[in-house]
Amino acid sequence: MSKAGQYTFTGISDQADIALFYLLKASKRTDFQKIIIEDKEWEDFTLVFDTYNEDYEVKSHKKPLSFSGVKKIITKKLNKQYGEKDKFRIVVRRLNKEFKECYEYIHDYILWIEIKGLNKDPIVKKFLDKKWSEDEILFLAKRVEIFEFGRIENIHQQISEYFAYEY
């Protein structure tokens, strides 16, 4: 198998493992309806609940996901009609350290940043300097949750623990 084929296979396998992990968590809830995997109008997978949806995009690249990689994802999502309660989650192997610090800052302080003005905040300026639009920054800060899983074995461990403690 070529290197490209190996990366594709690993990515699909990681996506399936992560979908199983979140499906197991959701299946305990009474408001959980179903999972949709790779449908034309959905993300890598979507968990459907009674009153909202959780969209998931999985990126298992060995190289940490940075400003440009996240921007590509966000740009595609801006045109999707999300309900007020809907969630969008990005699950990655690793984030670039600088991006992670900037994301955590704007995610935690977006209300304060909006009060004083987006273009007056030095961290927001880093995003703007990297050609992010204000809409993309606001979407990232208000709508997106990013989770790092590190090694896929961490997900496997959590899936195993689910079955070990359930039965």
Image (cartoon, rainbow, N blue to C red):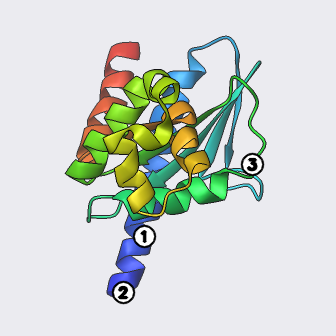
Q: Quadrant of the N terminus?
A: bottom left
Contact flag, marks 3 and 1 (Cβ < 8 Å): no
Quarter of the rendering containing residue 121: top left
Please name which of the two marks, 3 or 1, marks the residue nearer to the observer: 3
Residue 47: image location, x then y, percent: 64, 34
Q: Secondary structure at mark 2?
A: loop
Contact flag, marks 2 and 3 (Cβ < 8 Å): no
Could you tell which of marks 3 and 1 lies nearer the N-terminus?
1
Q: Secondary structure at mark 1?
A: helix
Count of numbered badges drawn on the protein = 3
Residue occupying the point 56% across, 55% down: 133
Residue occupying the point 42% across, 62% down: 69
Residue occupying the point 31% across, 51% down: 93
Q: Which residue is mark 3?
A: 80
Check disc 3 and give the amino acid type.
Lys
Could you tell which of marks 2 and 1 lies nearer the N-terminus?
2
Q: Quadrant of the C terminus?
A: top left
Q: Is residue 149 visible?
A: no
Disc 2/disc 3 C-alpha distance (Å):
36 Å
Contact flag, marks 2 and 1 (Cβ < 8 Å): yes
Disc 2/disc 1 C-alpha distance (Å):
10 Å
Residue 114: image location, x then y, percent: 52, 29
Q: Is residue 65 visible?
A: yes
Residue 83: image location, x then y, percent: 76, 30
Where 139 sits versus 128, above or below?
above
Disc 3/disc 1 C-alpha distance (Å):
28 Å
Quarter of the rendering containing residue 50: top right
Residue occupying the point 56% across, 48% down: 134
Q: Residues within 10 Å of mark 2 (few under 14, many from 20)?
A: few
Could you tell which of marks 2 and 3 lies nearer the N-terminus?
2
Q: Which residue is mark 2?
A: 1
Q: Which residue is mark 1?
A: 9
